[in-house]
Structure formats: C-alpha cells, structure tokens
Image (spheres, rainbow, N blue to C red):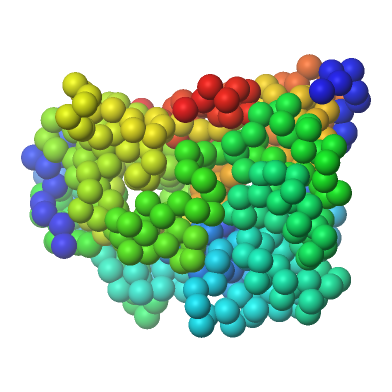
Amino acid sequence: MLASPRASERSPDLPWPLPLLRFLPLLLQPILTLIGTQVAKAQPDVFARLGPHAQKSFVIDPTDLPFVLVLKPRPEAPALSAWRRGNAPHSHARIAGSFLNLFDLIDGALDGDALFFSRKLRVTGDTEAVVALRNALDDVDGGVVESITRAFGPLSGVASATVSHLRTLGGRGKNHE
Amino acid sequence: MNDHAAPRRPELVCPAGTPASLRTAVDAGADAVYCGLQNATNARNFPGLNFTPDELRRSVDYAHTRRAKVLLAVNTFPPAGQFQLWKDAIGIAASVGADAIIVADIGVACYAAREYPQLRLHLSVQAGASSPEAIRFYCEEFDVRRVVLPRILTVAEIADIHRQIPCEIEAFVFGNIGMMAEGRCSLTNYVTGVSTNMDGVCSPAAAVRYDEEADGTLTTRLGSFVIDRYGCGENGGYPTICKGRYSCAAQPEPYYAFEEPRSLNLSALLPDLMRAGVTALKIEGRQRSRAYVKSVVAAFRRAVDDIMAGRQAALTDLIALTEGHKETQGAFQSKSWR
C-alpha cells in the first residue's frame, strides 16, 4: 500500500473557496456513483482485462484540482469516490497528472507512455495494476468519456457540451502542461 | 544499392495490443496488424493487454472486411514441457483465419509447418536471423515466407541480404529499440527471474517501482536494481536494464552503459528501405495506446503513399511519442551506433 501523497500535492494554488473545497467531494459523489455504475454496465470487458487487479484500489490525482478520486473497479460493485487531497484512503497505486492530461489519458486521446516519458504523468505503487488499468481503459471503443456522458440520460447533451468545452479550453489531443 | 530503382509498395505492419487498437490501426491505414494472445506465447505478455480467441476472431473479421491482414505473434520460446500452449496458439490462429503467424522457435515453426501447411509463416525478429544462411535455413526447412530482420543491419546490408534469400523482408521503422541481441537477452531474467524470451515480458511491471521525491527526482527500479534516477523535469524512458544509467568506479558520473532511452525512427530512410527490397515496414508498440497507434500509423501511411506517388514524403513530427523524446536511426544508417 502507498504512503500519503507528497506534501506539495496537498495544497495546489487554486482559488477554490474554502467551503466549496470542504464540500466538493460530497457534492460530486452522486455524479461519480452514476459514472461508476454506467461504465460498469456499458463496458463489462474492462473488468476481464483487469483480471485480479479489479480487486485493487487506485488514487487518481488531478494535481490542479482540490480533490482526488479513488477508484475501486470491482466487477460486482465498482466504486468511484472523491476525497479531499490528503484525506484519501491508502490505495495500491496512485496516478497523478493535470486534470486535462488524465482526462484525455482515460479517454484514449493521449498516450500514457508519452506522458510518462515527458514526466507529466506520475505513477507510484503497484505498477502492474496501473498498467492493467491503463490497458483495460484503452480498449473502450469511443472512449470512457463517451460512456460517462451517456450516463447522464436526458442531460447527456449538456454533459457532452461540457466535455467539449473543457477540451476546447485545454486544446484537445495535445499533451497538456 | 541502386539509388535509381523504383521503390516497391511496402505493406505497413502495425501493432495492436487490444481489439480497439486493432480497429484503430486498420482505420488509420494499416495494411496488416500484428497482435498476440493473452499468455506467454507472445513477446508482449503484459497485464490487461492482448486478445482472447474470440476477440481475435472478431478482429480478424473486422480487418478482413476492410482488406487488412492480421498476423498473430507466437514468437516466444516454449520452456521444456510446456509446448502445448504454443500448439494451441497456432491452432487458434488457423481456426480464426489469421493471415500469418510470426514464430521464433524452431520447434514451433516445425509444428506449424507440419500441421498447418496452409498457414503462412513469418520469422520473428526474436529468432535473430541476420544472415542469408540462417534465413535460407528457415525458408527451406519450414517454408518461412517472410523474415523480420533484427535491428542490427544497415540499409545496404538489408539490400545485400535481399538478393540472397527467397523470402520477403520485414523491417522495423519506428518504436522501441534495444541494444540486446533479440531473442537472446537474459537481463530481465537475471534481475526478476522472469524470461523475456519464454514468458514474453521484458521488465515485468510487477517488478517495476517508481519513487518520486519531494524535489521531483524520479527513481526507477527493476527488482532490487536502480535503473535510473531522473532529475526534476528530465525526460524519462522505459525501465529496462539496457536503457539504464549506472554508476561505476570507472566513470565519474552515472552513464548509459548500453544505450540512452530513445526510439527508432526511420521515416527519413523509407525510400532507401523500399528500394532495398523491404516488403513490409513494421511499427513497434503493441504495449502502447490507441492514441499512439493512430498517430504513428497515420503518419507512416501518409509517408509511404507520398513516396509511392513520387511526392516528397510528409514526415509528421512524432518526437512527442518517442522514449526520452529522442530518436535514432540505430544501425540502419551506420554501424557506428552504440
């Protein structure tokens, strides 16, 4: 299991109001639960690719946001939860990078090895579990983000527009700083 | 080599670690895609990677519908008493309609040639066949139709071999490149107990560990060995022993004992390779993502098409996808390469 994140990652310099920062994980949780359930339903092959690593837990750390995500990709009950940075439970592996890089990596729009070579992606802990997760997500046709936006049902159009806006802001397909 | 000879249209052979990657490669312009099963019968036996027999069957259908071929890599060496797994892999390749199998072991080649004479055989780079004599042996004994040449030959040497062998030549043009004799490297085995050549994995992820310190220094370990220590912001590479940076009494600073982290890129040599008689251009990277496959395959598709049309090849900048953000032409340009 991993140690806590580096001290420098606990307090990114972002102008997040303290009350929002405190309650953001709580506010995000219903959406994250929906995402986990939808991806599991739409992409069952992901768990087969993960094999024994589906029983592990992963911290996904968007270093420019004030929270981290904890992924437990259990086939029977996948769980995705948000935690205030520094409060996340110990996990088997940690994957850290900017939000947009992680976003495009998970969606298959960026190459993980290239990000790693450029030091814009940091991996610590169980490397084998991270490799399995990366390969499993990369086999999702159309990308995981498309599966996620579908989870919003009648609001999927709004979700897609939000994703497009995010990508426009960050420059889609580029290796984001 | 005759510089004025017309280039031959080569087959673009592209990697796929997953069914989605295979579809990406085909859609990006691959003439053929190579892949492996989810076991030790192929040299990219990584967690979460490769194909089940059913995925392979569906992928072959997808490729054939779009006039692309699928080559199955069965290119590791069976340990004593475990040959059945390799026999099964060849049987699967035949049953799903794979266009060829890529083999390295002579026992596997012999079995395939005897039991499945209709199945086209390619000789893997893992066989390390680098002389006309060795290649002719495989052709004569097992009816091998294509050899994937080790990455230790100059273009002039490839042209010379081409004149002396009865089979096609496939040459790597992009991707990971190691210094070790292919199919014979035991460095991973020495450090981890897992064999690159028999278990199909170089630097198994289970033995790799990354530790980043507060100042941004990244330490890469394979087993109990430190492979490299990258300074804050310094580009990194794969955690392979052959690309490691080591300290020793004879060197004042840590140094790359074998080779620096860098990738092969022969895009500038494509016309020469095509004139040298290379039938197929191979892109390395079954362990890489769909994003890599899409970018690299599309770039080489455009380059080959430009050359065949008599245009100056438009060579897309692929440096962002290379190991350590460095490229080399390796031994293809000159034997002075380390």
Quadrant of the rendered image containing residue B139: bottom right
Q: In this view, does B62 lie to the left or right of A124?
A: right
| Near-viewer residue (B230 or B123) | B123
Q: Could you tell me residue A176's position as x and y percent? A: 40, 31
Farthest residue to the front: give it.
B133
**Horizontally, is B193 left or right of B82 in the view?**
left
Q: Can residue B69 be seen in this view?
A: no
Quarter location, residue B5: top right
Residue B314 is at least partly visible in this image: yes
- Marks counted in the figure total 0
Question: Residue sitting at 65 percent across and 40 percent down?
Answer: B172
Residue B207, position in %: x, y? Answer: 29, 58
Residue B33 x/y as whole percent: 70, 53
Q: What residue is at 51 percent from the left and 25 percent from the top?
A: B337
Horizontal and vertical percent position of residue B197 = 49, 60
Give residue A59's quadrant in the image: bottom left
Q: Nearer the viewer, residue B184 or B298?
A: B184
Q: Is B137 placed left or right of B310 in the picture?
A: left
Residue at screen point 37% across, 64% down: B194
Residue at position x 35%, y 44% from top?
B241
